[in-house]
Amino acid sequence: MIDDLESGKVKEVVTRFPPEPNGYLHIGHAKAIWINFTLADEFGGKTNLRFDDTNPVKEDAEYVNAIKEDVKWLGFDWEQLRFASDYFEEMYNRAVLLIKKGKAYVDDQSPEEIRANRGTLTEPGKNSPYRDRSVEENLDLFERMRAGEFANGERVLRAKIDMASPNINLRDPVIYRISHAHHHNTGDKWCIYPMYAFAHPLEDAIEGITHSLCSLEFEDQRPFYDWVIAECEMPNTPRQYEFGRLNVTQTVTSKRKLKQLVDAKVVDGWDDPRMPTISGLRRLGYTPEALRNFVYETGISKAYGQVDRQVLEHFIREDLKLKAPRTMAVLDPIKVVITNYPEGQVEWLEAENNSENPEMGVRQIPFSREIYIEQEDFMENPPKKYFRLFPGNEVRLKHAYFIKCNEVIKDENGKVIELRCTYDPETKSGSGFTGRKVKGTIHWVEATQAVPAEFRLFEPLFKDEESDEEVKQMVAGEAESEEAGDTSEKSFLDDVNPNSLQIAHGFVEPNMKDAKPQDKFQFFRHGYFNVDYKYSEPGRPVFNRVVSLKSSFQLPKS
């Protein structure tokens, strides 16, 4: 870009982020958004948000609104809001120009016949029997297509380039098809719509885009992009530049497949916290800063590759460790009665909200005769080197006292339902006690004021690295398109992880009672959690676990 500016080739850098409104944005789009907006900003330019809404069958105003919200949430703002459909008349006129120049023709072949005659990577295609229609006949037929005389799929308009080209994208690609469908922006004005590959370069040229930045699977489309600009005699000449897609392991980023997950109710919507959508990540508890840092660190290149999801998780941990208040939550509770603590007494203990960020201050925690601890923090017959609570053993309660287990209460089925313990009042945290030491520290929540809560614990939605083959196909030029379907024999839904969501019911400290949706916390030993906006109710919060506290992953040193 700097070379283009210094040479005078362009006076101002103008980019665009051009999603099709046929689904919600995903993690891969975060990179495209970041690249377009930050590069333009770095060179004093501007970026448009443009909706490539050329396929009314799949598009919806819901997606338009969601995309705008996601872009703003990530921290970016556009210069102009545009729609491809704003230019339909101009695109139609440019198609007419191609017909008049003998560069386009109406084809009566069925989609199956066109596909069969397209050829392969090693064999040339075959000319359509309608390829040599006269200019007058093509103009008449194209006008009648627009007037609605023909049914869907009955005719298409194709560019006339070269059916023997080694680049399949130049073998007379379809540039207009018939679709009697209501459009979210233009209503029922049109019944023919331009194909994306034809519309996109025209949109860039109309808007004065200087640098058309797109992901790598569009590299083979670049010759057709340039052909459209030249043959349609556009006054501006944008240039296309490709970058490698952002692919994360155990993640699907095909909007077609994501829609299948929604339609099949595998997830509870596009914003399900297990989804790789930006709205799903936001609901899970990711911050815009974490996502921006993540895409910045992955960099810009043209190489194929995947990023381990642990890298993504690293950045949310780094972002939240100084922002999230630290508190205690018991996800799988067992009651503890401290038999030598005075009945009816409640004392308030002081605890730091974040030991790494003293500016976050302190909070008061109630302590009384009855508390809850985690089931996993007690074992009746523990193995060696188990330092938590068991009969006869002593542990420290975080921010409180030493307690010792003296008695185990079970129900009629032999399940442990209550522990009877004693505490040592000399061991209060912060008192300076220097007597005996204990090896185990466990967390707890005071029982009488504990707030009931639901905890939603997530694993990757897919058992395997689902995106591997999908991305390789895209890089090989076999990306899904408006004309393609899922031809795989095995449904990707078969790889859904049945344990991707586990729900636990427990308690949090009383200061969490008024936690608001999207508030984030670090729960001692459990991880970072975010208040869910869909299922939380006043006085009964629902927490999504954003990420566990630790990982073996280490960011490489630069």
Image (tube, helix red, strand yellow):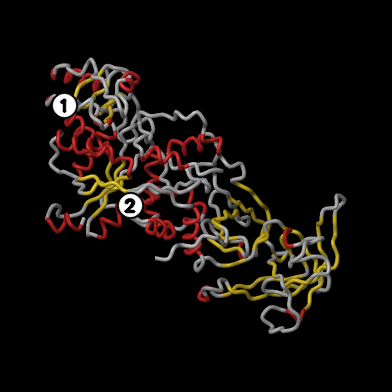
- What is the three-letter code of the residue carrying label 2? Ser
Please name the residue that numbered disc 2 is placed on.
301
* Element type at mark 2: loop
Indicate left or right for 173 with 519 as reference: left
- For the point 16% across and 43% down, which residue is it? 237
- What is the three-letter code of the residue carrying label 1? Lys
Indicate left or right for 211 with 274 as reference: left
Q: Is residue 151 visible?
A: no
Task: State the image coordinates of residue 372 (x, y, percent, origin top left).
Answer: 73, 63
- For the point 32% across and 44% down, which residue is it? 216
Task: State the image coordinates of residue 339 (x, y, percent, origin top left).
Answer: 83, 70
Q: Is residue 551 above or below residue 174?
A: below
Please name the residue that numbered disc 1 is placed on.
103
Task: State the image coordinates of residue 348 (x, y, percent, origin top left).
Answer: 68, 74
| Closer-to-camera residue (223/27) | 223
Q: Residue furthest front?
A: 122
Q: Is residue 9 visible?
A: yes
